[in-house]
Image (cartoon, rainbow, N blue to C red):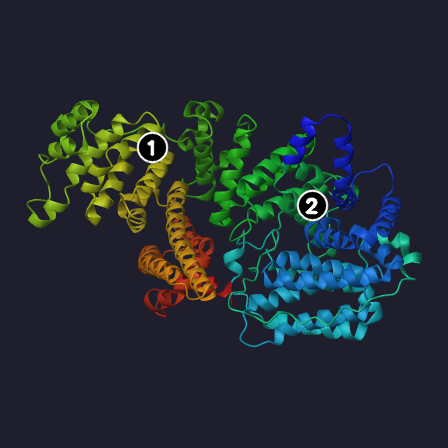
Amino acid sequence: MSRRRHSDDNNDGSQPHKRRRTSEPIEIEDRLESLICRVGEKSTSSLESNLEGLAGVLEADLPNYKSKILRILCSVARLLPEKLSVYTTLVGLLNARNYNFGGEFVEAMIRQLKETLKSNLYTEAVYLVRFLSDLVNCHVIAAPSMVAMFENFVSVTQEEDIPQVRSDWYVYAVLSNLPWVGKELYEKKDVEMDRLLNQIEGYLKRRQKIHVPMLQVWTAEKPHPQEEYLDCIWAQVQKLKKDRWQERHILRPYIAFDSVLCEALQHNLPPFTPPAHSDDAVYPMPRVVFRMFDYTDAPEGPVMPGSHSVERFVIEENLHCIINSHWRERKTCAAQLLSYPGKNKIPLNYHIVEVIFGELFQLPAPPHIDVMYTALLIELCKLQPGSLPQVLAQATEMMYMRLDTMNTVCIDRLINWFSHHLSNFQFRWSWDDWADCLTQDLEKPKPKFVKEVLEKCMRLSYHQRIVDIVPSGFSALIPAEPLCHYKYGDETSGSLPGFAESTTVGNAIKNRASNEEILTILKDVPNPNQEDDDDEGESFNPLKIEVFLQTLLHLAAKSFSHSFSALAKFHEVLKNLTESDEGKLHILRVLYDFWKNHPQMTAVLVDKLIRTQIVDCATVANWIFSTDMAQDFTRFYVWEILHSTIRKMNKHVQKIQKELDEAKEKLEKQQNKKRDSGDEEDMEKNSEDEEGQLEEQIEKLQEKVESAQSEQKNLFLVIFQRFIMLLTEHLVRCETSSIDINTPWYKNCIERLQQIFLMHHVIIQQYVGTLENLLFTAELDHHILAVYQQFCALQL
């Protein structure tokens, strides 16, 4: 900053020259980074000549900038996996010219691999192992030492008392890299490789797969099996081995330099022992491979590789890598996907659409924020207007046809994506093609999907627009006009209990009455519960809540902002009315009755009531599972409310826990400082005072954390208890009436239970012991217990 000011003041021509000299090393470092990161992108020269030129530049700069070059190359190995073979070739060329540099690079990569594993960065660790594997093809690493590393990886399957997900990852790290290096390793070490694959096969046969149903997008195995990821990669590697390790899709620029690279001296990998298992290790969860298309769906042009061909894995893996590298920049990401190398040999649009939906529907959660996939697909449609929208429409049609067997959580994401997508294209869609849903029960997946999509579209537009764009035959599925229902506003409402008081309250609010004045007016509201129970009547008067909240919401019904202001202004009145649990529950009932035709307003105001502590999270859960909400129980907005409520509770606990950790850290620093400072009395007295204050603060925070965790545990207990009650009632009713349990309601309910487990698995894991002792006991119906067992198997 000072340098810039100086150059502005002294405009004599000498200063810029001085600046350039002092910043020259930085400029060269930036230039090196730019050259390395951009190699392999579009260029007038061939990739081979660019690589040779870059290798020459880097070799010349090695004496002065070796550590910088090492750091950049290690970073691109981890962060740009889609250009893997470009960088392995570059390292191969540098190793051929400077053997010591090759050795230092291999050591740096091993150090980085150990660090990523310790930091639980398992995706990046797979990329690093793949890079090391490909260095075998570039004659940088000796094949026997790579086989030895793979053997150490597979030996993890023999460890005792470890979660299955740990050994799963190490097996996947070997199998997923064999398409790159399998041929080379088999040529050099066929006996050892056969033994390695036999060990893997034995492991795959004995591993548990209870978790699979919970992670499948579709329950049906037709038209495409939804395979567990290790089973799928195993089948692909077996076919690759059968084809003598020949694959035709990996870009291998090092082949052009074979005569140079084969002369280079190779390095042995240092012995690599996988870090021991620790309780704080967070291994990747298992996955199910998403399949939507096969060769019959892409009628023209190149044929789509089969689901068990290794080419399918390589293409999908590279597309995932491109999305992972560029997801923050949708335009760059879309352009990179469409300029995928070898795009003329494959039906690229079909692969891209399948991979994007595979990520969007990944359970328990997509790798990136949901809206990114919508933005990316819109960008792709803009770049390929002649072909990609047709593939996307075909995919949407296929998913609509398979809604009956689609996971409810994935249907939610499909609704969000499709409505958002339509809003960017004037809501144009061939609705008549979906007229088959009009003859079905409204609770069936197809009509329910169309109804929820239209409701979401209305949030992104307005009611009349939706009425205008949808054919008149769909009127039963068009959402109700989002108007409020003010019970004291009808001509017939004069006879309703509380009518006179509502008029008085309304006038008082209009005249800017204070909270105290409103409470005085409400004292005159008769209590319908008084006769039944005098004590109860004092604390809970449902009519008071109805009179006040109906009137307040009616006066503030113009917008979200009006409603927020009204709730904030009369916070004291609302707190007074909701002192009891019945009061809290009743305020939600009144809110729902008033805004039942406007789900978004209901969701937003429930959120506001939680934030302002008028209702608590457990009350919201009890309300959602109450008979008042039975008719809306399977609607999308209800589950938005529940998950938002759980997230709020979780964030509250995390916030207090963070404050406690910071206070403990501060105290520890204070004590260390005291030890180091010696015996100065004043200093010691001050530090003792500070320590006392901190200890007191820590004690209070500890109590708050325990209280919040207790509240959090109670919330999950309430939710699971209510699920068990509802599902048990349904199962008993079906059994006594001898009817099939698999109704649309049952599918929705059991999959919502799965959703709670999946979306909040990290938190629920803490309370597994309590859940097992109190709720998910052996006596529970096996249909419900199976969901809990699938959840437990996810982290086994």
Q: How many marks?
A: 2
Regarding residue 496, the answer to whether it shows in the image is: no
Q: Which residue is mark 1?
A: 597
| Residue drawn at 62 percent across, 69 percent down | 275
Left or right: 509, with 381 as reference point: left
Q: For residue 782, what is the image quadrant? A: bottom left
Regarding residue 300, the answer to whether it shows in the image is: yes
Q: Local crowd at mark 2 within 10 Å, few (<14), some, or many (≥20)?
A: few
Q: Which residue is mark 2?
A: 296
Q: Say above or below: 285 vs 143.
A: above
Give whichever of 115, 424 is nearer the camera: 115
Q: Say above or below: 258 vs 272.
A: above
Can you give x and y, in whole percent of width and height, for residue 655 in the image? 40, 51
Give whichever of 784, 249 is nearer the camera: 249
Q: For residue 221, what is the image quadrant? A: bottom right
Can you give x and y, in whole percent of width and height, for residue 27 in the image? 76, 41
| Residue drawn at 86 percent across, 36 percent down | 44
Whichever of callouts 2 and 1 sits on the residue coming sooner in the sequence is 2
Can you give x and y, in whole percent of width and height, for residue 428 in the image? 55, 27
Can you give x and y, in whole percent of width and height, for residue 485 in the image? 27, 29
Give whichever of 399, 620 is nearer the camera: 620
Left or right: 49, with 281 as reference point: right
**Type of the residue with mark 2:** Thr
Q: For residue 127, what is the image quadrant? A: bottom right
Quadrant containing the N terminus in the rendered view: top right
Left or right: 492, with 65 as reference point: left
**Type of the residue with mark 1:** Asn
* Disc 1 secondary structure class: loop
